[in-house]
Image (cartoon, helix red, strand yellow):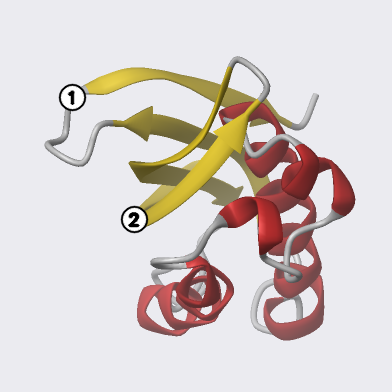
Amino acid sequence: MKTELFLRFEFLASHSLSVREEPHLHLWRVVVALGGEPQNGMIISLPDLRAAFAEILAPLEHTFLNDNCLLDADAQRAPTCETLGAFFFSTFSDVLQRQFAAQNPTVALRSVEVAICEPTGFEWGSAKLSKE
């Protein structure tokens, strides 16, 4: 039986795009989906996984994403749901392999969804990147 886990994160950060060049603040929502076969009653330790992914997101909080050197070049040039999703997918996949594959070799990242919202919470839309 396949099981999926979902982790949800939020962070506030500003960005600038060619269509709206003045830096402006957004609430970014990130939903990470993982799959695998439960071992000893679980796919993976959620607190450990949440802490590992939160370490990736924490340095983005309250920054200007275009200047954040932790992001790859595509995400810095145009910090959008699509480019951030690709960055998170790659980064979270690496963390899973390095830190969690020994706990459960069946665990795999299924998708990352990034939503762009107004600081009040209104969601403009999202992009979902998934492994095919």
**Looking at the image, is 33 positioned above or below residue 56?**
above
Label 2: element kind: strand
How many residues crowd mark 1 within 10 Å: few (<14), some (14–19), many (20+)? few
* Amino acid type indicated by mark 1: Phe
Q: Earlier in the sequence, mark 1 or mark 2?
A: 2
Q: Which residue is situated farthest in the right direction here?
A: 73
Residue 4 appears in view: no
Left or right of 25? Residue 87 is: right
C-alpha distance separating marks 1 and 2: 13 Å
Task: Give the residue number, with chain letter if any, for mark 2.
Answer: 12
Residue 128 placement (x, y as % from top left): 58, 25
Q: Position of residue 71 (x, y in %)?
A: 74, 60
Picture residue at 46% right of the left edge, 75% below the top: 58
The picture quadrant where one finds residue 94 is bottom right
30 versus 128 height, above or below: below
Residue plotted at (59% across, 54% down): 65
Seen from the viewer's position, the closer of residues 63 and 116 is 63
Q: How many discs appear?
A: 2
Residue 122 disc label: 1
**Would you call the spot at circle 2 few (<14 residues within 10 Å), some (14-19), or many (20 or more)?**
some
In the image, is residue 83 above or below residue 4?
Answer: above
Please, which residue is most extreme toward the front here?
Answer: 22
x, y (%) of residue 112? 58, 39
Residue furthest toward the left?
Answer: 120
**30 shown above or below 37:** above
Instruction: Check disc 1 and report its element: helix, strand or loop.
Output: loop
